[in-house]
Amino acid sequence: MSSLLALLLVPVTGSIVAAIIQRYRLAERLVSFSTFVVTLLFLIDIRVGDAFTWSLGFLGKNIEMGLQITPLSIFMLYMTIAFGVLLTFFDLTERSKMKSFLLLLTLAASNWIFMATDFLSFFFAWELMGWASILAIFGGRRTAESRHGALYYAMMSIGGSYSMLIGIFLLSNLTGSFSIQQNVSYLVSIMTVHPWWVLGIVSMFFVAFMVKSGIFPFHTWVPYTYGESPDGFVPYLSSVMSKYGIYGFLIFLPLTLSLRNVPGVLGLPWPNYTLVWFGSITAVVGSVLAFMQDDVKKLFAYSSFSNLGFILAAIALFTPIGLTAGLFHAFNHLLFNGAIFITVVAVISKVGITRMSEMGGLWQKMPLTFLTFFVGIASAAGIPPFAGFGSKWMIFQAMISHGLIFATVLLFFASIASFLYLMRAFHAIFLGQLSHKYDNVKEISAIGKITEVFLIGALIFFGIFPGFILDPINSIVGSFGLKPLPTSGYEYINGFFSSVNMVSIFIVVIVAFIFGFLLFAVSAKHKKVPQEDNYTAGQIPKDWNLTPEMYQFSYDFYEPMDKEIAPFLKIKIDGFFKGFGDSVEYLGSSIKEIFTGNVQIYTYLAIGGLVIFVIAGWIVW
């Protein structure tokens, strides 16, 4: 059996077994973990250039279909499968309602998407991934809310899928083929002659990719879905599945290389320039909305698609540094977002709530989870020497190299805002006074601790030695016909203007930390007092109608800034989609009234339809 085919059959087989034994939770999770491990073992045996093909009869044609490994696809496969191994290992002792057989179906679909050589396979895998994930979302903590989140996600996904399907058939009618490579080559050949026609077709695909990655203005499903999904599924949904759209963009972005001589903006073809702004606006919108959240899952849902905006803005440049920075940040986002969501899941499993203002002081009960969360948010904020700093540093250099000052300012603003909302989560969940209702909270299991230690190590290792991930990224850049960035060693990050030595930065940070710790140790002793002893400056809390929950300093966190931002958020994008949905529902109800059961009406409709077909030329007498 081909190892490529095994990447599809092993997850499908595991999914069937998991579905059969799903009543036995531990056995089901062992099957899920084992399936990811076996899939990873098959992947290790695969090399760039491996292929597997077959033929299929479709619409009277013999269609060549197949699987192939490219530098980009193997990069995405390793991220997807390796993270799945980690997540299913962590989930062995958790109480999430995640259905393992649906997660394994999603894995099979993911592998197929990254290896597909034709648009029929790509679309079928895309739909399998979409429906498996939609069904998985139904298992959230709150049944009604998770159903709403799943249906919202389903409607957005269906709209994106229909858009992609139209693009596929428009393109295949022009080329007579479903081959991805042949169709992209055809678009390159007609780019200078029919640029608007090419843009129209590609836009059909881009809508689907923007929906899947939560790119503005198709981001509205993200907080509902992430916030209500089963806790064990959210890390996979946020860290892995959000990258499918990025992969899709990279199928078509090579087209822009043929537009280098076409007038554009600041040296960029205007389609690239437009995507840069979509990415930049997404980064800002995500950060601002995250800034105002009290629900921890929704906060990091907005954080996640904000980072997808950084990635899109970078890859849209489609220059060596832009593509390198975007893919580097995609990898870093997988790590730090996975660490954050896994620690959030661990906390929620212990306290049973998601509102940060009702938490606090949990570092005393969950010190390792606290440390993992800290390293994760430090990486997300781009603080050296953790993973996340290097990719953001490269993104800013890539933007400035094209003179995109305003877009750079937006991304910088999003980065500053991310630091603020990450600090809010850090303080609200782990710092401050520990509520008495959490006196019996304990650290997570040994398996959870192993997972967290691994994530801490990965975030530090790839922060200090980024070259280990930049090497395969350089191979991807070269496969697109671009000149990879120079390499100076595993500890260096090379940018457009300069390079940095991450080992040196690490040493400086460690020295500064030791100095700060010694300063703290020799300073005056501190006395721990109950929070109500100093919260009201000596006043009696009951006189001010204050309750113990309000002592937590994350209560109405950033309230003055929230009031300043609120007026700008009166126009809601999801209001547009709700209005559109109501219009479709009204139209459907109106059409339904036609079907009364009267045969005469059906006859008139059939005759009218036949006349339209004849006039349109679809029926020739």
Image (cartoon, rainbow, N blue to C red):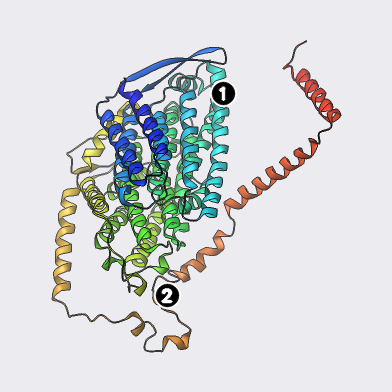
**Residue 525: x, y in percent?**
18, 80
**Residue 572: x, y in percent?**
58, 55
Residue drawn where x is 52% and y is 30% of the image: 202
Amino acid carrying label 1: it is Phe
Residue 337 higher or lower than 2, as above or below: below
Residue drawn where x is 51% and y is 68% of the image: 563
If the image is split into quadrants, where does the C terminus sit? top right
Q: Could you tell me if residue 328 is visible in this image?
A: no
If the image is split into quadrants, where does the N terminus sit? top left
| Marker disc for residue 549 | 2
Give the crowd class for mark 1: few <14, some 14-19, many >=20 residues within 10 Å: some
The residue lying furthest to the right in this view is 600
Left or right: 602 in relation to 434:
right
Q: Quadrant of residue 513?
A: bottom left
Observer-nearest residue: 604 or 595?
595
**Residue 18: x, y in percent?**
38, 38
**Which residue is under mark 1?**
169
The residue lying furthest to the top in this view is 621
Q: CA distance from mark 2 to mark 1?
A: 58 Å
> Helix or strand or loop: what does disc 1 sit on?
helix
**Residue 332: x, y in percent?**
31, 45
Observer-nearest residue: 181 or 32?
32
> Helix or strand or loop: what does disc 2 sit on?
helix
Residue 21 higher or lower than 556, as above or below: above
Amino acid carrying label 2: it is Glu
Left or right: 322 in relation to 498:
right
Left or right: 461 in relation to 15:
left
Observer-nearest residue: 140 or 493?
140
Q: Quadrant of residue 394?
A: top left
Whether the residues at callouts 2 and 1 have beta carbons within 8 Å, the answer is no
